[in-house]
Image: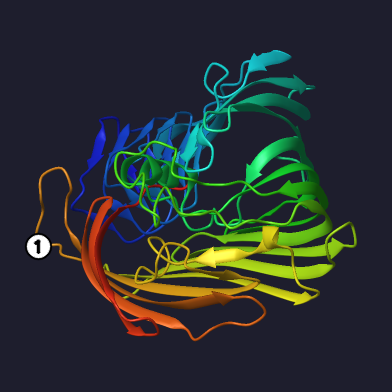
Amino acid sequence: MRAGSGKLELPRDSTITTSLLVLGRPTYLASRVQGDVVVVGADLFLRPGADVSGRAVAIGGTVAETTLGRVVGGVESLRDETYTVESVNGGYALDYRSLRVEENDPLFQLAGFKGVKIPKYDRVNGLSLPVGVLLQFREHALELEPYATYRSRLGVVDGALEVRTRESAPFRVVARVARDTRTNDAWIKGDLINSVTSLLVGSDARNYFRADLGEGRVIRSIERPAYSIAPYLGGRYEKTRPITAVGNVWSLFGRRDSLRMARPNPLVEQGNIGSALAGAEFRTVGVVTSRVNLDVEQGFPSGTSTFSQVTFDGSVELPTFRTHVLKFNAHAVGTSRDAAPRARYAYLGGSGTLRTLDLLEQGGTSLIFVESRYLVPIERITLPFVGSPMLSFRDAFGAAGVGSLPPLQHEIGAGIKLSVLTVEYTRAVAGKKGYEIGAGVTVPTF
């Protein structure tokens, strides 16, 4: 706990091995915190290099985020509540005080930033630019968000409508109808990183198909101090069709490369897919942080085939010796009964998964990918702007195929991490032989 009135600066080369509570002090955080960061009665400014394994919370203030840092448990700004801090017998007493000014949000407002939602860029759509509005009723008990997305390569405008009930409710509903370009490979890289790598180096780590769809879920949210779980039930009906990729989308490098922007897009069957959905999202915060998503899809006879598919995606991060950190990531897909349509195939290979394979070289109805990474901070070295470098040791294996898995591809690697930039050498030790030297950027997931 840190208390007082002056600003508190926590530099990049420092590590706090517990949760941090700050009372009444504007906090500028660039260090590593193994737990939560809670600032009461002031603002929390996240600086480049900040690495928080739990949550970042400002009570009576605002959390100012940075894209050059990481907060595993998410950020929260409770501007309408605060506490009066008083020194009492060598400790502190917190007396709750509400700052809330009752003011109803307007019924109609622009979505995103002045009506523009986050754009994307890839090799099949080119630029996808969504614009829309937001209608809310009874203080966000119900939200309707109609929007349209212009896709530069296709020269089309895709319409969509999202429906949501209040996010803080124990039970909530999310649904949408849309004409969309869909992918099963968003787990490999986030939208921002995939868009940047597509634009700059022509590395689009996703395959795509077009679909007209309607889908909805009923979600039960259970929040506890150390974990949260959100099981859901729902359904989806979509009409799928293939989309091509012929290298006519601009990129700084790799536009005509058959392994990059000109990489053929696997064709899917044109038809209808109706299915029931079930699953859960599970999160833990604290000394050990974890994230697990489990999704089950049961297809119905509706023009293609009946299938059952389970998708698992998860990660665990835990401290080990001193300030060392061990991370695990895993993704798996299993399909039973009839053959799943190609619109449900999953892929791996290349940057983001198995680097000694070509980009999305393997794919099918079955997939497994497991990666472990051991990070060792070099605390004796502090560099300007980037702080202390980290040694990174990586082990990864996996495979994907139709019906069954081919022999596993296994690779090991070592590198160095400077802030958000990692340079790494990787060599295959089983499966397809080869090695790769590459650089990557890590940013928080949005």
The front one of 149 and 63 is: 149
Residue at which label 1 appears: 380
Q: Is residue 5 above or below residue 215?
A: above
Tell me which amino acid carries mark 1.
Answer: Arg
On the rendered structure, is 215 left or right of 3? right
Which residue is at 15% across, 62% downward? Answer: 379
Q: Is residue 59 visible from the viewing direction of this image?
A: yes
* Secondary structure of the residue carrying numbered label 1: loop
In the displayed image of the protein, which residue is found farthest to the right? 301
Q: Is residue 240 above or below residue 141?
A: below
Q: Is residue 122 above or below residue 355?
A: above
The x and y percentages for residue 395 are: 35, 77
The front one of 320 and 374 is: 374
Q: Is residue 322 visible from the viewing direction of this image?
A: no
Q: Quadrant of residue 10?
A: top left
The x and y percentages for residue 330 are: 51, 70
Instruction: Check disc 1: other Cα within 10 Å, few if <14, some if 14-19, many if 20+.
Output: few
Q: Is residue 342 above or below residue 370?
A: above
Q: Quadrant of residue 41?
A: top left
On the rendered structure, is 38 left or right of 265? left
The x and y percentages for residue 333 are: 63, 71
